[in-house]
């Protein structure tokens, strides 16, 4: 098929590329979609899907160990068969990946190519021996785990979010460098599977972007399960050790070396833009390699757009999918949707999960406007008490003048679902008062959100 002309080329079958191919072909366009590795990209293969499947296995183990709390008797020890856990995760992933690949291969008007795509010019993309041309190119190449440049990194085996999923035996002691979203999910999962786990984080708090009260509560949850948390500990070097690997840390407290059998580096992600020939198309990137886009996700080169993690405007599956919605609505429906209209929301899938939307309290305070803040511990949420899962709290921050919600955090059982009540209100630009006459379902975590909104007060100065 060397030298083919299309209406559009989509590079990457992650979270934005496939639905975009669906809409473009639906509009009668001839589309080439190129994928170099696994259909579904990070989310399906090495991100959301396998990790949330592991989180479910870990939660089952945790609940089984707590069975006595519920009056349930398990005779004998609770153990985890990692090979079976892995087989379950692999099966869930394979079903999603294969379903997506089948859909794309059967899509009328879509030519699927396997291989590494790279620009030859503004309109030409090479995939092996094939040269594809199109007036529109959509880049959806995602990212990968970044490997920090530090002494010894090349001398020790280390895991990332992909290779850790291939483990079929339990590490004796997993050291996680990086106490943020990805690192913490794996830390709790492997602790619940039975490994000793240490988290090394250079910031004074875990997930430093969150408010300190949220980070502290998460730290307590993880410590309560026996995870050693070393905050304020900067990893400065790695080296082999007779028990596996030694992580040297600069810290004010605790030993300057952390030794474990296995090392997970979870210190951030970098975009897959370094081998895409962007310079031959003239597409600009920022200093970290993220493709520079405008508010409608167009690059600096007319006819080329960048969607998903590679544009640095989001780092989630739902933001990548929203990029697809924005680009397709603007191109095909005459809309003028913008990324800046998106209200940021996400979850951290430790157990219990953290659901988040909008600003943190610290961000809201930095804005300088008068605020209202309301919070409630999960010990005062009936559903959480009934479920025997009372860790965490919920907190909402609003603008005292407009009475619109600025942000919220729900750390606790069901927090990843309950946060959507707040997210939807923010999307609808409703005021706090709009919640007042809603009749929430009892017993739920969500039913306490209107109560929190009704009890909001100005925050204590400087708190
Ligand atoms: C451990 C982990 C857990 C996560 N959990 C969640 C979660 O619970 N919820 C959530 O919302 N997000 C989660 N994420 C983030 C989420 O996975 C990403 O935000 C999402 O996958 C981004 O989608 P994307 O389409 O931008 O890129 P990707 O899904 O990475 O897809 C990019 C695709 O492009 C292909 N590609 C790259 N370069 C080329 C090339 N030159 N030629 C051809 N093909 C190419 C890649 O092979 C890949 O298939 C998680 C991420 C990780 C690492």
Image: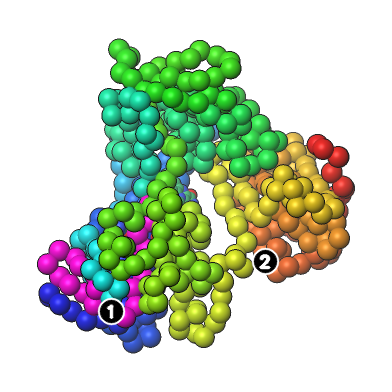
- Please state the horizontal and vertical placement of residue 429, each as a whole percent of the image: 73, 68
Q: Which residues are magenta?
A: 124-143
Badge 2 is on which residue? 427
Q: Is residue 128 magenta?
A: yes
Q: Is residue 273 above or below residue 134?
A: above
Residue at image location 64% in from the left, 58% down from the top: 420
Of 422 and 31, the residue lying toward us = 31
Seen at 66% across and 60% down, the residue is: 423
> Whole-Å distance between the Cαs marked 1 and 2?
36 Å
Residue 297 appears at what percent x and percent y? 47, 69
Residue 224 visible in the snapshot: yes
Tell me the crowding category of disc 1: few under 14, some 14 to 19, or many 20 or more residues within 10 angstroms, Cα based. Answer: many
Whether 358 is among the magenta residues is: no
Q: Secondary structure at mark 1?
A: loop
The colour scheme applied to this rendered structure is: rainbow
Would you name the residue on which mark 1 appears?
Answer: 134
Front: mark 1 or 2: 1
Occupied quadrant, residue 208: top right
Left/right placement of residue 438 relative to residue 264 reads right
Residue 13 appears in view: no
User: Which mark, residue 21?
Assistant: none
């Amino acid at each position: 098929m060397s030298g083919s002309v299309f209406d559009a080329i989509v590079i990457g079958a992650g979270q934005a590329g496939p639905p975009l191919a669906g809409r473009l072909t639906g509009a009668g366009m001839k589309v080439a979609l190129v994928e170099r590795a696994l259909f579904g990209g990070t989310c399906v293969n090495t991100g959301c899907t396998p990790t949330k499947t592991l989180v479910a296995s870990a939660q089952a183990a945790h609940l089984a160990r707590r069975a006595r709390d519920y009056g349930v008797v398990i005779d004998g020890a609770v153990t985890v068969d990692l090979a079976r856990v892995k087989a379950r995760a692999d099966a869930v992933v394979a079903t999603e990946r294969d379903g997506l690949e089948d859909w794309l291969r059967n899509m009328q008007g879509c030519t699927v190519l396997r291989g590494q795509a790279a620009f030859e010019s503004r309109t030409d993309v090479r995939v092996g021996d094939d040269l594809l041309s199109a007036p529109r190119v959509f880049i959806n190449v995602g990212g990968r785990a970044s490997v920090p440049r530090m002494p010894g990194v090349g001398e020790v085996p280390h895991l990332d979010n992909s290779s850790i999923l291939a483990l079929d035996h339990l590490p004796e002691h997993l050291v996680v460098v990086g106490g943020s979203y990805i690192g913490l999910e794996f830390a709790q999962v492997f602790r619940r599977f039975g490994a000793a786990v240490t988290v090394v984080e250079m910031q004074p708090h875990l997930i430093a972007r969150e408010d300190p009260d949220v980070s502290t509560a998460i730290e307590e949850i993880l410590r309560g399960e026996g995870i050693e948390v070393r905050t304020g500990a900067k990893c400065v070097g790695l080296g082999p050790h007779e028990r596996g690997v030694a992580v040297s840390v600069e810290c004010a407290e605790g030993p300057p070396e952390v030794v474990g059998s296995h090392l997970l580096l979870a210190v951030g992600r970098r975009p897959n833009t370094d081998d895409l020939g962007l310079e031959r198309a003239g597409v600009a990137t920022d200093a970290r390699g993220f493709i520079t886009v405008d508010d409608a996700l167009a690059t600096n080169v007319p006819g080329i757009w960048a969607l998903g993690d590679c544009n640095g405007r989001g780092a989630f599956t739902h933001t990548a999918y929203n990029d697809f919605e924005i680009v397709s609505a603007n191109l095909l429906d005459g809309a003028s949707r913008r990324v800046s209209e998106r209200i940021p929301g996400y979850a951290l899938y430790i157990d219990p999960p953290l659901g988040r939307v909008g600003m943190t309290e610290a961000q809201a305070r930095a804005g300088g406007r008068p605020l209202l803040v309301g919070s409630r511990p999960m010990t005062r949420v009936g559903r959480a008490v009934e479920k025997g899962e009372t860790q965490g709290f919920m907190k909402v921050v609003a603008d005292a003048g407009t009475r619109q919600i600025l942000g919220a955090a729900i750390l606790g059982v069901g927090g990843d679902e309950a946060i959507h009540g707040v997210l939807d209100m923010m999307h609808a630009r409703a005021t706090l008062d709009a919640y007042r006459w809603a009749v929430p379902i009892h017993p739920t975590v969500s039913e306490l959100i209107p109560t929190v909104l009704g009890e909001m007060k100005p925050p204590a100065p400087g708190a």
